[in-house]
Image (cartoon, coloured by chain):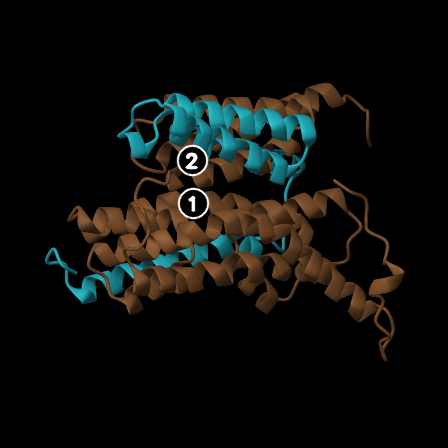
Chain colours: A brown, B cyan
């Protein structure tokens, strides 16, 4: 991670009300720029959702209903898959909510950073809390612990603009232009590669490695459980392993 | 929908999922966040991303849906290269590029 960037002389805009708004805007833009690589994955993934959902018989409004109201890629694919398998509505809903339950952990993990935000701000952060916006923001907050609350929110907003809006737009495009996308392009693997690339640089201590290792092992052992359930057991096991290694290795290192 | 599921059913799923997913995301941040979380909870939460995301993708790496759940050398190698480059360079974009090149290279050759 690079240190906090210094304002470059050539990018300075003269502003009537002092430097602070421009700094917030720079933070917003930094969030947006850092999210750009996700578009490589997000755009084909969103197109694919539009195509798959349309092929399953949904109309454009329903595709947009999913991408705007649910806004959670993995569970949207799960829902379309189960609906076309004629699963009962209650199974569809429970499975998809289980797939999304990991976001409760994201929500809890953001509390120390966004505790003082207003109720409205928390509501929209919650609405836009997806894997990518969570991962990039927590990375930024941890790397720059002295960011102010407005800057944290600005960074989050920048990420969301690049990550969530294209999700909606390209779902719509996929639903309208439909079947022009080749089937054999191995898009299924875009998401695993992005997530692994995101996580590897965060594995900086033995505790992080332990958390990752235990969670992966757990998820593989529990892979036979219904969709999403194995993750809900494996992830807390990994988190506990990380916490245990941390408290063992710390022993008064920091107050 | 084409297979006999009514539009109303699809909309019901969309609305319930939308509300339910929002409540999941809002839970701690909105409703439970005003009280102080105990130290052991905070310590566990520090490891949320490095536990959840790898656990989410590990089964997809080992048993990819695209191959009908059969382990696939190209996808395994791509995942391993992505992690190795990410650990080594600490650069997410380099890791994605390396993983994608490995995947498409091997899929092309095999």
Please give the chain letter of the residue carrying mark 1. A
Helix, strand or loop status at disc 1: loop
- Residue A143 seen anywhere in this rendered image of the structure: yes
Q: How many marks?
A: 2
Q: How many neighbours does mark 2 have within 10 angstroms: few (below 14), some (14-19), or many (20 or more)?
A: many
Residue A20 image-quadrant placement: bottom right
User: Which residue, as the protein is rendered here, is positioned at the far left?
Assistant: B4
Residue at 43 percent across and 31 percent down: it is A233
Q: Which quarter of the rendered picture does the N terminus of chain A lie within? A: top right
Residue at 42 percent across and 35 percent down: it is A232
**Residue denoted by label 2:** A232
Looking at the image, which is closer to me, A26 or A47?
Answer: A47
Q: Is residue A166 left or right of residue A120?
A: left
Looking at the image, do the residues carrying marks 1 and 2 touch, with CB atoms under 8 Å apart?
Answer: yes
Name above or below for residue A165 compared with residue A16: above
Q: Is residue B30 left or right of residue B88?
A: left
- Pointer 1 or 2: first along the chain: 1
Looking at the image, which is closer to me, A21 or A97?
Answer: A21
**Residue denoted by label 1:** A101
Residue at 29 percent across and 67 percent down: it is A60
Q: Residue A201 at x, y = what percent? A: 65, 33
- Residue A116 seen anywhere in this rendered image of the structure: no
């Amino acid at each position: 991670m690079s240190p906090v960037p210094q304002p470059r002389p050539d990018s300075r805009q003269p502003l009537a009300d002092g430097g602070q708004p421009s700094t917030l805007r720079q933070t917003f833009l930094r969030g947006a720029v850092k999210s750009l690589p996700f578009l490589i994955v997000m755009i084909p993934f969103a197109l694919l959702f539009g195509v798959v959902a349309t092929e399953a018989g949904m109309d454009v409004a329903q595709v947009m209903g999913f991408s705007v109201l649910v806004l959670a890629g993995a569970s949207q694919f799960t829902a379309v898959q189960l609906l076309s398998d004629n699963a009962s509505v209650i199974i569809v809903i429970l499975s998809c909510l289980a797939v999304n339950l990991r976001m409760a952990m994201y929500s809890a993990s953001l509390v120390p950073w966004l505790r003082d935000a207003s109720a409205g701000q928390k509501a929209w952060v919650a609405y836009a809390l997806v894997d990518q916006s969570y991962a990039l923001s927590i990375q930024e907050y941890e790397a720059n612990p002295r960011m102010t609350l407005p800057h944290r929110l600005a960074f989050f907003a920048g990420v969301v603009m690049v990550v969530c809006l294209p999700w909606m737009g390209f779902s719509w495009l996929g639903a309208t232009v439909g079947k022009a996308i080749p089937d054999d392009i191995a898009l299924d693997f875009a998401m695993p590669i992005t997530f692994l690339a995101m996580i590897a640089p965060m594995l900086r201590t033995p505790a992080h490695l332990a958390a990752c290792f235990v969670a992966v092992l757990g998820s593989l052992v529990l892979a036979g459980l219904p969709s999403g359930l194995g993750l809900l057991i494996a992830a807390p096991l990994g988190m506990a392993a990380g916490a245990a290694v941390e408290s063992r290795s710390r022993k008064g290192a920091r107050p | 929908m084409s297979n006999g599921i009514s539009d109303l059913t699809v909309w019901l799923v969309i609305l319930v999922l939308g509300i339910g997913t929002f409540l999941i995301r809002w839970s701690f941040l909105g409703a439970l966040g005003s009280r102080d979380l105990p130290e052991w909870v905070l310590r566990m939460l520090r490891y949320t991303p490095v536990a959840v995301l790898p656990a989410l993708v590990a089964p997809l790496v080992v048993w990819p849906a695209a191959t009908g759940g059969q382990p696939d050398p190209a996808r395994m190698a791509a995942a391993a290269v992505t992690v190795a480059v990410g650990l080594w360079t600490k650069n997410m974009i380099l890791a994605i590029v390396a993983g994608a090149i490995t995947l498409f290279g091997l899929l092309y050759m095999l």
